[in-house]
Each structure stands twice: as C-alpha cells, then as structure tokens.
Image (cartoon, rainbow, N blue to C red):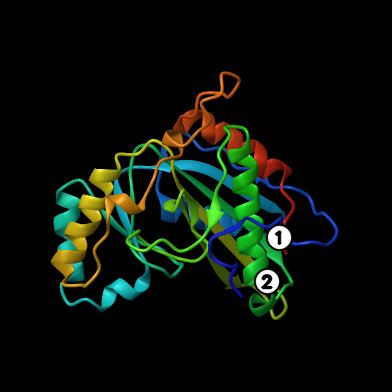
Amino acid sequence: MWAAEGTALPEAAGGPPRPGFALLPTAGTQDDLALEQRLLDQAAEGGAFAAVWECHPALVVPPTYRRFERFEALCERSAAEGWPVAVRRSGGGLVPQGPGMVNLSLAWRTPARLSDAMEPVYLGLCALLQHAFDGFGVQARAQAVEGSFCDGRFNLALDGRKAVGTAQYWKRISATEHVVLAHACVLVEADLALLVHRANAFEARLGSDKQYSVDAVANLADCASAAPTAPALSACSFSQRLAQAAAQAPLPC
C-alpha cells in the first residue's frame, strides 16, 4: 500500500477529475487542533477545503504518547519553556513545529473506503506538493528517512533528507461516508538544529528510545534552484504557491 522507496513521485491517482479545494482564510499563526476541527466541521457539511498555515513553536504528538507515565507533567514543563505540546488526531510520531515551517491541511467528504483510498490520498497529497515545488526548481522523492522525526514512507525527501511529513485521519460521519483530513508539514526555512534539539529533549525526558538527527532533515530553501529565473523561496512565497496548487488539485478520492 506504500510507494516504493527512493522512486520519483507518481502522478495523482487516475479517474475523472474532481473540483479543487476552497481555501479557508487564515491570519498569523494558528492553533493546529482548532484549525483541524474547523476543517472537519466544514467538510462534513459538504465541499472540499484547504488551509495553508504556520504554527507557533510547539511539539505535536499522536495519542500513543499518552502511554508514558510522565507525559502530563512533561507537557506542563515544555509549555513553561515556550514549547506547548498538542495531541493530534492522526498517528505517527513527534513533530516539532516552529517559524519557517508551512503546513497544508486538506479536508473533504467521501464515500470511499479507507482500505481502498489510503494510498491514493497520500499519492494525491504528494503530487499536489510536488506541483508547488516545481515553481522553485525543487524535485522531491517519496521515501523513509532514518533519523527524521515522524518518519514514514510518504515523507518527501530532498537528496535523501526529509523536508515534508505527511499524515491522514478519517472520521466516519454516516454509514457510508467519511471526512478525510490530509496533512503535510513542510520545512521551508526553519531552524533545523533547534527543532531537532527540542524533539530530542522531549523524547529523552519521556524515557523513549527515539532520537533524531539534524542530518536527516532539510529545508526547501536550501535546495531551491539557483537559476536566475527561479523565484526566491521563503515561507511566504511557498505558502502562496501551495495555496494555488491546492485550489487546482483534484480530490484524491
């Protein structure tokens, strides 16, 4: 069900094209969980919606992290240090958020089944992202990257270093339909050393065996084309390009 590691990104799943995503207005940094709930609620009423947004410094973890005995106490400590911890709906691992990172969240209603559509959702999300990368001369590949945070086979990597993490969450809303929430977190011009340090510190305090390497991650801005005709790549310019790509992208399922 996963794309082959180290291969060029495939095109989005075939079939008749469906309308693109309507962009939700956002301003400034966002509360990720509140924004996700807003997307889920609107998609449940019909339509397909996208949000391109940035988050304040935070550590975002899946519900499985609640199993650690010291989790609640360490969340309080991390918040006091300026890095609050949020528990997201999807699985995976810890993801640090901070300035210089751009997030894309998509939500839509579908009669498709999770077992049939999980891979097309990831492929469609990756194709959308690559479309946004094209304008900056960046070519990504889908692969796992050992030592990166929240590693997965639908990471997008630049020269073997993770630049994008992807995830999805399905919520049943009727006997025959779900709302899908698909998400991508993009390193554009982030402080990679700081993000890895904060992630490693939290994992160590929890007593987990996970540690991450700054050599396993990369910023898009460091890999953009140096051609004179290529636009400058920043969090702002990439956000604009990503919003355009979402408005044109077909629904994956």
The dot on residue 11 is none
Q: Are marks 2 and 1 in contact (CB under 8 Å)?
A: yes
Which part of the image, by quadrant, shows the N terminus?
Answer: bottom right
The total number of labels drawn is 2
Among the 4 quarters of the image, the one containing residue 174: bottom right
Mark 2, secondary structure of its residue: helix
- Of pointers 2 and 1, the one earlier in the residue sequence: 2
Residue where numbered disc 2 is placed: 117
Q: CA distance from mark 2 to mark 1?
A: 8 Å
Q: How far across and down, in percent of the image, does residue 207 sit?
A: 16, 72
Depicted 65 relative to depicted 27: above or below: below
Can residue 28 be seen at all in this image of the molecule? Answer: no
Amino acid type of disc 2? Ala
- Other-residue count near label 2 (Cα within 10 Å), few / some / many at <14 / 14–19 / ≥20: some
Question: Residue at 66% across / 36% down in the picture?
Answer: 244
At label 1, which amino acid type do we have? Pro
Q: Position of residue 44 (x, y in %)?
A: 65, 62
* Relative horizontal placement of residue 214, taking residue 32 as reference (left or right): left
- Drawn side of residue 157 relative to residue 19, left or right: left
Determine the residue positioned at 58% across, 40% down: 133
Image quadrant where one finds the C terminus: bottom right
Determine which of the numbered discs, if any, sits on residue 252 in the image: 1
